[in-house]
Amino acid sequence: MSSFFQDHRNSLLALGVAIVAFMMSAYVVPEEEQVVIIRTGNPVGVVNTPGGETGAGLYLRVPFIDSVRRIEKRLLDLEMNDEEVLSADQQRLLVNAYARFRITDPVRMVERAGTTDGVRNALEPILNSVLRQELGRRTFQSMLTAERGSALANVRANLDRQARQYGAEVVDVKIMRTDLPEAPLQSAFRRMESDREREARTIRAGGSRDARIIRAEADAEAARIYAESFGKDAEFYDFYRAMQSYDATFSNGENPSESSIILSPDNEYLRQFRGRR
Amino acid sequence: MAGKKSPWGGGSGNGGDNDKPTGSNGGDKPKGPRNPWLPPGGGDDGRRAPNIEDIFKNRGPEGPRRGGGGGGSNFRFPQRPGGKSWFPVAVVAIIGLGLVATSFHLIGPQQEAVVKTLGNYTRKMEPGLNFSAPFPIETVDVEDVEGVRTVRIPGNNSQAKLILTGDQNLVDLSYIVRWNIKDLEGFKFRVVDPEETVNEAAEAAMRASVAETELDETFSGQGRAAIEQDVRERMQATLDSYGAGVRVLGVEIEKADPPAQVVDAFRDVQVAEQNADAARNQARGYAQQVLAQAEGEAEAFDKVYEQYRLAPQVTRQRLYYETMERVLSQTDKTIVETNNVTPYLPLPEIRRRAQEPTTTITAPEGQ
């Protein structure tokens, strides 16, 4: 086993040294990253920056002297935690937003913020305050409408201006959540409840109104039918209806002999009975 | 033999020196266990510049040089016939195998792959058998581009997701976003965490959309469809502006309910609607009954009247007598001769009857 190494000792050693030297001086910049080369503390070059001349690939550096600082080239996100924001009409609102940014000037970023996390830390309070300012100028209602778009455009512009100082570019700011804090939440629930109660009442009232109208229309229609039919001979109707009425009143089929009738002999019914003519 | 050091780093493998005669490497190389593939520390703030070492570590089983030749440390290779070691042969064979394995890529029908040559994106691989330069030179990243990915928002946490509507009400909403990859290059190289980006874009778009919708619309089918469409378009616009390479296939609202706290009031509205409907139905029933009765009575009168007109006097008399017959046959009758006599009313009789409902009437005068 050792004979192989013995035979080729020098060439293997040379190869090893060459490989080690290559490994120490070569570095790969992948598509997702940009790189700042720092020579004894000073940035001396950049690789694969957005819009830069060099792209991703294999690069060489001077070992020990040049160090390579890798920086994300892709779009990064900056999230803001739930913050209570006061609107222009003194309503409280829980807002949660995010911003998307990318590093466009890595040298400046390295100098001013160090790392992307440094940029995040720097931008977070700025996003926070810019958002507060902007939303504080608007009413609660307008935050819920399309106007929100223009507010966010302003926030983005303001944040972008600050971010440029750190070599970053803010692509987008979006509000993820606008929620009510606990106390207004409860009152919103109460309002929703009373809204629904009102609605339920209106619906019930509407139902009974419709029912009444339907009944009245039917009654009116029935009256018309009666009048049309009976009006042909009011005098006969009087007689006819009287007969029906007597029937209904006196000849109660269920318990017959409940009524007593005292007839005078003058009664028309008894005219023949009396045999007079 | 003791003076020789392995060019592969000696005993840098784990405990490899146990059965190797070159045990003294710790003495003549102070940083003995250190991996020679790593650059000296402190050169660049702890970051290991050449990533090839990482790459090898991640290669899995076929990674041939893990730990710098440690493979040969734990056991003695059998001797070749010529008395030489199999070790170099094995190393070469493993490396060769790895190179070959990383050069063939079978891309499935739903998949695409991006090829990076030394980190630099060079080309895309379409479905089928593809070749690339072996691993360290070209890396191939295969991704399912056609497959539909589904995100459910809110996720598994049972907490209700309340969203403010345009009329400052709250709606408890959950929805599903379906998406796939439109542009693999963008998906890989433009955005740090595409999945999370999709989630956030969905959330922002949904809240913006619902904020422009009235509460009742979020419950109605048509309103929901409008929101779904709107969210899809907003999301697509946002993601396109990021160059995220994502295609939003659809947004489906699974559930849009009133918040649990006020759900009773909402139910009461439904109950009210049913009550109102019930009242209307009852009224309609009444109307039909009344009309039927009116029509029936009118019709009956018309029929009788027709006959009456033919012979008024006789019909009238007949009706009168028939009715009186029915009436008087079922009642007690008392006939009082009134002419000059004070009528005696059988009051005890009547009083006895008075315990039951009694009707007393004096006969009508004439007809």
Image (cartoon, coloured by chain):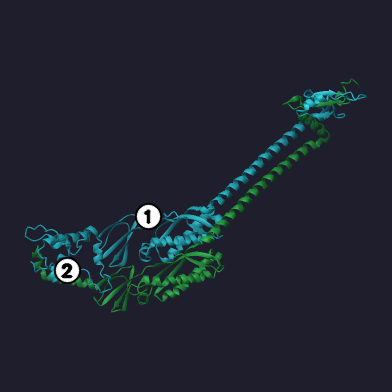
Q: Position of residue B90 (x, y in %)?
A: 15, 59
Q: Which residue is label 1 attached to?
A: B147
Name the residue nearer the viewer: B152 or B87. Answer: B152
Name the residue nearer the viewer: B358 or B349. Answer: B349
Residue at (65% x, 49% y) in the render: A205
Disc 2, SS:
loop
Q: Colour of chain A?
A: green
Q: Residues within 10 Å of mark 1 (few under 14, many from 20)?
A: few
Disc 1, SS:
loop
Q: Which mark's residue is nearer the viewer, 2 or 1?
A: 2
Left or right of A240? Residue B190 is: left
Chain cyan in the figure, letter:
B
Q: Position of residue A137 (x, y in %)?
A: 54, 71
Three-letter code, disc 2: Gly
Q: Which chain contains the residue that carries disc 2?
A: B
Res B46 quadrant in image: bottom left
Left or right of B32? Residue A42 is: right
With respect to residue A195, does A29 lie above or below? below
Left or right of B250? Residue B11 is: left
Q: Which mark is residue B32?
A: 2
Three-letter code, disc 1: Gly
Q: Position of residue A80 (x, y in %)?
A: 44, 66
Residue at (70% x, 38% y) in the render: B290
